[in-house]
């Protein structure tokens, strides 16, 4: 039996134990996967306590994704560039950090054959998730990224750190409407936490998405956020956050065990988690 866990604070509502239980069954690979609530001051001690076999690794969630970086022996280039680690692998007494959010974000778009090269994309929100989204879009060589945030200074900082051409705006009606109408984006991503309560939307009152845009919400509970409901009403194709969550977990599995989980199995697990 191998062991792994997701560490975060708080972490009790994490879906990761259910996802990895499903992976373990589908792949017939015994894995005991738990959720461990770790306060920031306990991060180093927790890492020391679990870094030996039979532990294979950890998933890392808020608020530890950045703080764990200096505690590792090695960090993969993508995680280093993002300054954030969401997967740790233990091997030969060494701790290696990875980031699977970038690949996880792109997976549902690739599955539905949405191509973004040269296209205009809008990202709402400028926190940790938005950083992974912007990195993914840059990697896809999109034509332009328009980044909107309630606190524009935070978006400006993110754009500076990403060292690419990212256009920064305030998340308010006029600038958003202007970009939606004039630039006709192919993709609008909600990377804010507005919608987690099932009631709030990142879209300022009266703003409508163009029906040609794909609307992607990173929030996975609830499945139908107010943002996605409004987008569907406009006739947009929608992408649910659960696809990203399951895809980044599948990337984690590959890092720990060297095995890919088939798209068919991933889709079945995603469906089972929706119900
Ligand atoms: P974070 O670092 O705390 O950032 C939160 C962002 O949401 C900030 O840009 C914040 O704006 C904005 N925001 C919060 N409330 C808002 C409101 N009422 N109206 C407009 N903007 C608001 O969080 P994060 O780690 O980036 O996560 C963001 C979301 O992505 C969360 O819902 C998380 O569950 C989800 N997520 C999903 C996956 C997945 O696999 N599907 C992975 C990672 C994250 P200010 O800067 O102005 O405060």
Image (tube, helix red, strand yellow):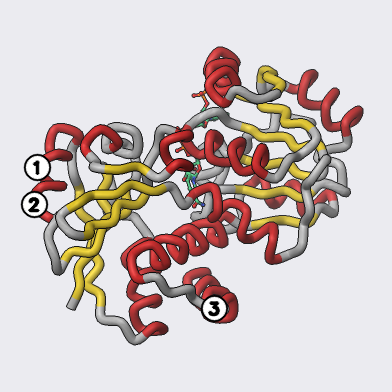
Residue 150 seen anywhere in this rendered image of the structure: no
x%, y% of residue 179?
A: 83, 26
**Residue found farthest to the right:** 182
- Label 1 sits on residue: 45
Left or right for 179, reference 58: right
Q: Secondary structure at mark 1?
A: helix
x%, y% of residue 215?
A: 72, 48
Residue 225 drawn above or below residue 3: above
Q: CA distance from mark 3 to mark 2?
A: 33 Å
Instruction: Choose the circle earlier in sequence order: 3 or 2.
Output: 2
Q: Secondary structure at mark 2?
A: helix
Instruction: Choose the circle earlier in sequence order: 1 or 3.
Output: 1
- Mark 2 CB near ligand 1 (8 Å cut): no
Query: Within 10 Å of the Cα at label 2, are there few (<14), some (14-19), or many (20+) other Cα atoms?
Result: few
Label 2–label 1 contact, CB within 8 A: yes
Q: Which quarter of the rendered picture does the N terminus lie within?
A: bottom left
Residue appearing at x 54%, y 78% in the figure? 262
Label 3–label 2 contact, CB within 8 A: no
Front-lying residue, 238 or 187: 187
Query: Within 10 Å of the Cα at label 1, are there few (<14), some (14-19), or many (20+) other Cα atoms?
Result: few
Residue 72 drawn above or below residue 6: above
Query: Within 10 Å of the Cα at label 3, are there few (<14), some (14-19), or many (20+) other Cα atoms?
Result: few
- Label 3 sits on residue: 262
Residue appearing at x 53%, y 71% in the figure? 270
The numbered dot on residue 220 is none
- Label 2 sits on residue: 49
x%, y% of residue 150?
A: 59, 21
Residue 73 seen anywhere in this rendered image of the structure: yes
């Amino acid at each position: 039996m191998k062991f792994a866990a997701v560490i975060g604070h708080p972490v009790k509502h994490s879906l990761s134990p259910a996802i990895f239980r499903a992976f373990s069954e589908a792949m017939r690979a015994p894995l005991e996967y738990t959720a461990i609530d770790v306060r920031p001051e306990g991060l180093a001690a927790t890492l020391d306590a679990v870094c030996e076999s039979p532990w294979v690794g950890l998933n890392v969630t808020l608020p530890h994704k950045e703080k764990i970086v200096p505690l590792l022996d090695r960090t993969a280039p993508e995680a280093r560039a993002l300054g954030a680690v969401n997967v740790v692998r233990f091997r030969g007494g060494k701790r290696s950090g990875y980031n699977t959010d970038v690949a996880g974000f792109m997976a549902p778009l690739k599955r539905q054959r949405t191509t973004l090269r040269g296209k205009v994309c809008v990202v709402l929100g400028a926190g940790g998730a938005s950083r992974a989204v912007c990195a993914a879009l840059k990697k896809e060589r999109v034509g332009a990224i328009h980044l909107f945030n309630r606190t524009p200074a935070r978006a400006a900082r993110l754009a500076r750190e990403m060292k690419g051409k990212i256009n920064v705006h305030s998340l308010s009606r006029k600038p958003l409407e202007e970009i939606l109408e004039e630039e006709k984006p192919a993709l609008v991503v909600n990377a804010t936490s507005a919608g987690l309560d099932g009631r709030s939307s990142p879209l300022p009152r009266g703003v409508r998405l163009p029906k040609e845009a794909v609307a992607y919400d990173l929030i996975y509970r609830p499945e139908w956020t107010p943002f996605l409901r409004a987008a569907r009403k406009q006739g947009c194709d929608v992408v649910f956050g659960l696809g990203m969550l399951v895809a980044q977990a599948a990337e984690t599995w590959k890092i720990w065990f060297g095995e890919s989980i088939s798209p068919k199995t991933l889709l079945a697990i995603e469906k089972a988690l929706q119900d």
